[in-house]
Amino acid sequence: MTRDLPTGLADWRQAPRVRALNDQPLGTIGDHVLCWLQQALRGRDNPVIDAAVRLGNALRLPVLVYHGIAEDYPYASDRLHHFILGAGRDLAADCRARGLTCVHHVDRAGHRERGLVHRLGADAAAIVLEDQPAFVARRQSERVAARAAVAVFAVNAACLVPPAVIGDDVRGRSGFLRRHEPERAGWMAGEDVVPTVAPYDGPLPFTPDRIEELDTDALIAGLSIDHSLPASVMHPAGRVAAQDRLHRLVADVLPGYATARNDATRPEGASGLSPYLHFGVLGPREVMAAVTAAAAGARHKAKFADELLGWREWFHHQARMLDAPARYDRVPAWARDTLADHADDPRPEAETLTAMLRGETRDESWNACQCQFLIDGWMHNNLRMYWGKRIIAMTPDPDTAWATACYLNDRLSLDGRDPSTYGNIAAMFAGSPADNERAVYGRVARRGDGSTRHRDGGAAWLATAATRAIPAVSVPATLPRNAYIGTHTGPGRKATARLLEE
């Protein structure tokens, strides 16, 4: 990385990919730069690590990379833990190959550590962390910065074009694209920053886990997490699986992408990269470099770029403008108003949370969608639109509909808890207003299943997809909803506070 990171200490706070989270000065007596990763779990092509290394080189200090995984983050499960630990193992290996010290902590009974980020940062000259606008990462970063006695810098690793380049005054996607598209080529070039200081070998306030030696299955089995949700076979953890997906994109998906992307019955129609992008195993620059070099038509490349950059980075931009991207009040007022006007309409298609969670509703097409979440930890984008629209009619009121959609997405999907999936759900609850008002939906447009059912073999595909063997997932006594409906006091707040105050 070159263009997006500062070349000297004087301009550190003006770098387009870097955002200062406090007003503390750079330390003068620290013995390292702490690089704390929560979600950008890759050791290469990672702007967060590169920023920390460049700062360390300028201060003549080594970089200490830290990644920890808690036992009580919202919706912690076998599925998420397997994916995160697999990514963490490859992160450690790639950091070592770059000459960087990387330490890990897996929170569990008999192996608790309190306030590790603060303790690791106590002797640091600065803390560099990732700039994530959603889920618990955002609040945790803010709390660390408020408490730290040294400068804390947040670095964006999720977007190709740094959000600061776009600015805060863009309101619509067309305006966003007018600024974003001309910038893309200029942010494609980059290389890993090479440390000029020996790896950190100083004292640590805890005994790190040797993540590459952990028996992941045995470890996860002993945790107090959701064991009813198994790991996804479709999306294995780690860099090898991510790069296999990227190679598949280039060879099988991209040559027909613009034509096949909306056909859920065709496995070659979707890239399946979203879980790896969400957890930062792949970055957008690496993906776009592969797309640019691919032997595919310009129309297909342009459509994929529009999805990855035009939509995904637009949703990230939206999330940065919102105090809580997962809350229902992000939906445009006109849509909330028209849904509220029809909140008391009869709902003959209402379903129980148990039926919805387990994909056992009266709607075969919706069940086919839900089975992808339950089994694969992912859902085809065309199915997601039908799935989200139908939830409005399946639940007793709009607030519950929003909370249900977010809960199912966040708990089951590997790409849940993400600016992109929250943005997609918001679009399902709004979009372009319909010409006429209808029961339950008001002027929010409905969506049928015809784009799948009416294809050749579509009805048979839906019938098969709806009857796949699903895991015996547990059902909560009540729907988690506070984080999605009101102020940020829901499932993430207690976990966030405990993680940082212990």
Image (cartoon, grey):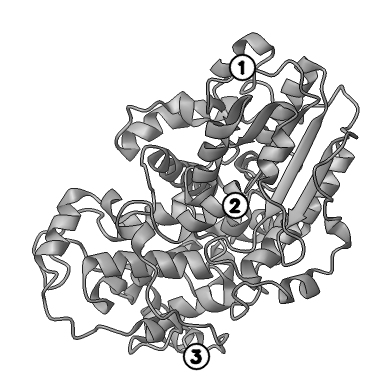
Query: Could you tell me the amino acid type at mark 1?
Result: Pro
Give the image quarter of residue 78. bottom right
Local secondary structure at mark 3: loop
**Residue at 42% from the left image edge and 83% from the top image edge:** 367
- Dot 3 or dot 1: first in sequence order is 1
Rendering quarter of residue 126: top right
Looking at the rendered structure, the number of numbered marks drawn on it comes to 3
For label 2, count other residues whose C-alpha is less than 10 Å away and answer few (under 14), some (14-19) or many (20+).
Answer: many
Circle 2: element type:
helix
Residue drawn at point x = 57 percent, y = 78 percent: 375
Q: Mark 1 points at which residue?
A: 25
Query: Left or right: 383 with respect to 499?
Result: left
Quadrant of the image containing the N terminus: top right
Q: Judge from the rendering whether residue 201 lies leftward or rightward of residue 476; answer left or right.
A: right
The tag on residue 320 is none
Q: Which of 379 and 483 is in front in this view?
A: 483
8 lies above or below 435? above
Mark 3 or 1: the one toward you = 1
Q: Nearer the viewer, mark 2 or mark 3?
A: 2
Tell me the amino acid under the disc marked 3.
Answer: Thr
Q: Indicate the position of residue 418 as horizontal and vertical percent values.
A: 49, 53
Q: Are marks 2 and 3 in contact (CB under 8 Å)?
A: no
Measured in 3D between alpha carbons, the distance from the residue under mark 2 to the one under mark 3, in whole angstroms, is 40 Å
Q: What kind of residue is marked 2?
A: Leu
In this rendering, is residue 226 above or below 66? below
Q: Name the residue under label 2.
A: 499
- Residue 52 occupies quadrant: top right
Which residue corresponds to mark 3?
467
User: Which tag, 2 or 3, sits closer to the chain's start?
Assistant: 3
Furthest-top residue in view?
10
